[in-house]
Amino acid sequence: MITHIQNRIAGLTYRAGKYPKKYHKKIKPYIAFTKATLSNPRSVGAACPSSPFLAKVMAEQVDVKKEGYVIELGGGTGRITRALLEHGIPPDKLITVEYSPELARHLREEFPDIQVLEGDAGKLDQLLADSGNPPQHIKAIVSGLPLRSLPKSTVKAIKKNVYKLLDDKGLFIQFTYDLRTSSSQKNKFRLIDSSVVYRNIPPARVNTYMKRV
Ligand SMILES: C[S@@+](CC[C@H](N)C(=O)[O-])C[C@H]1O[C@@H](n2cnc3c(N)ncnc32)[C@H](O)[C@@H]1O
């Protein structure tokens, strides 16, 4: 069954190449997202890409004037990536990490000016070291990762990396489909902002944490 669906999507991808450029550009992210979902549903963990409204609220948490890099985890189709660039993060100060090869390829094509690292955000320190030019200062980590559906060991490794790599008082911005208010995470982070974005499928809560010194 899955193979049948994958073949259908492969056919769609082929036909998409024959559509006028503007239609191809519009459906391409959805094809990449569906392919990634079919090959690893737990890892994608969402019914559809983040809405531009959710992406904007996430991006606006980052202080553009502050020095340092912004790392995006789980770049996916690039909705949050685009919002970060539109918010004013310079392309050479933005690095996105994506596990799915399909979506990493899509991100590279869509954003040739930013660095796209393909791999597991739970090994972020290694991925950055292997990139040859690891950032000295990381002011914010913006995550579109489905933390509630990823294996516990992966989530633990991701949180450990986020804490280790962020500057003091750096921000960790994460959205969740759990709309209840959250508390700060084990004293290492302080919740400094939390709001619900209803214009997303499903509605999501954006939590902004500051690393405690
Ligand atoms: C909710 S989806 C994408 C959200 C994205 N903002 C969008 O609109 O397309 C989560 C993304 O996280 C990626 N992902 C899941 N586990 C990951 C991991 N351990 N490391 C890096 N990326 C991961 C998935 O492949 C997927 O693209």
Image (tube, rainbow, N blue to C red):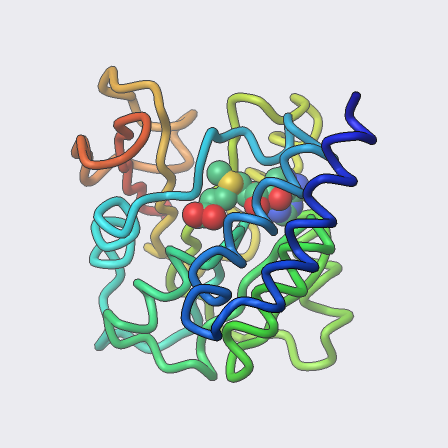
Q: Residue at x 44, y 78 (%)?
A: 93
Q: In the figure, residue 165 lies in which quadrant?
A: bottom right
User: As drawn, is 146 to the left or to the right of 99?
Assistant: left
Towards the viewer: 151 or 177: 177
Towards the viewer: 201 or 113: 201
Q: In the figure, residue 67 lies in which quadrant?
A: bottom left
Q: Which residue is drawn at 47% across and 67% down?
A: 25
Image position of 121 with respect to 114: above or below: above
Residue extending farthest top: 180
Image position of 9 with respect to 24: above or below: above
> Which quarter of the rendered picture does the N terminus lie within?
top right
User: As drawn, is 25 to the left or to the right of 37?
Assistant: left
Image position of 137 with respect to 29: above or below: below
- Image location of residue 73, percent across then percent down: 53, 51
- Image location of residue 31, percent across then percent down: 58, 49
Q: Residue at x 43, y 43 (%)?
A: 49
Q: In the figure, residue 48 lies in which quadrant?
A: top left
Quadrant of ligand 1: it is top right
Towards the viewer: 188 or 200: 200
Tell me, yes or no, if residue 143 can be seen here: no
- Image location of residue 114, percent across then percent down: 52, 78
Q: Residue at x 23, y 55 (%)?
A: 56
